[in-house]
Image (spheres, rainbow, N blue to C red):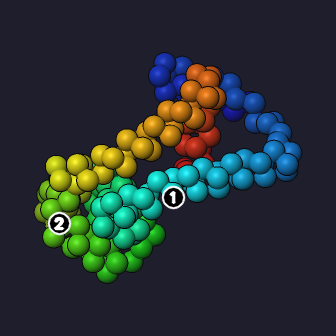
């Protein structure tokens, strides 16, 4: 059996690699992920109208918000966008004073990205709505579902 390290305790736990899921269960999981994405999209579309940002700009800003300290290259890779697109979007966000670029490490050309106070303020209503939706879902699912959900999503995004 494979072993897995518990992130909180550092202890090794045995994981049964024989987990068997039927296609119907997997299809149901995919349908639930798509439904979740639609809810998140609805919330972010409303935020687009309120902030005046386009979908790409808002997604970029949200990525910086939830993963502060990324370099432009890392952000480009995460977003799956070209360098010119990222440069254009960052330029637009920079003109609105929504992002802060700080020198990162030994290479002075590498800039680490974080939100400015204005960027944080702009995203606060969106983040609050997303948190509320997730909080409600976790409460409905029960405390036992929180760690399992997180583990599944982390494994999916690896």
Residue 117 vertical position relative to residue 72 in the rendered view, above or below = above
User: For mark 1, what is the residue?
Assistant: 41
User: For mark 2, what is the residue?
Assistant: 96
Q: Residue at x 24, y 49 (%)?
A: 120
- Image quadrant where one finds the N terminus: top right
Q: Secondary structure at mark 1?
A: helix
Q: Residue 95, can we see it?
A: yes
Q: Nearer the viewer, residue 11 or 77?
A: 77
Q: Nearer the viewer, residue 21 or 18?
A: 21
Residue 108 vertical position relative to residue 132 in the rendered view, above or below = below
Q: Residue 69, can we see it?
A: no
Q: Residue at x 46, y 54 (%)?
A: 43
Q: Nearer the viewer, residue 44 or 105?
A: 44
Q: Position of residue 3 (x, y in %)?
A: 64, 29
| Residue 105, picture quadrant | bottom left
Residue 118 vertical position relative to residue 89 in the rendered view, above or below = above
Q: Residue at x 53, y 33 (%)?
A: 136
Q: Secondary structure at mark 2?
A: loop
Q: Residue at x 77, y 48 (%)?
A: 28
């Amino acid at each position: 059996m494979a072993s897995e390290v518990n992130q909180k305790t550092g202890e090794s736990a045995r994981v049964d690699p024989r987990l068997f899921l039927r296609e119907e269960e997997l299809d149901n999981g995919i349908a639930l992920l798509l439904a979740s994405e639609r809810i998140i999209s609805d919330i972010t579309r409303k935020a687009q109208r309120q902030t005046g940002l386009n979908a790409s700009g808002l997604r970029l800003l949200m990525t910086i918000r939830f993963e502060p300290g990324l370099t432009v290259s890392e952000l480009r890779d995460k977003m799956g966008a070209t360098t010119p697109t990222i440069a254009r979007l960052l330029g637009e966000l920079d003109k609105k004073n929504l992002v802060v670029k700080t020198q990162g490490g030994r290479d002075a050309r590498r800039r680490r990205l974080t939100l400015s106070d204005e960027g944080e303020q702009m995203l606060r209503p969106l983040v609050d709505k997303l948190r509320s939706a997730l909080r409600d879902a976790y409460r409905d699912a029960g405390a036992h579902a929180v760690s399992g959900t997180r583990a599944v999503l982390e494994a999916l995004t690896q």
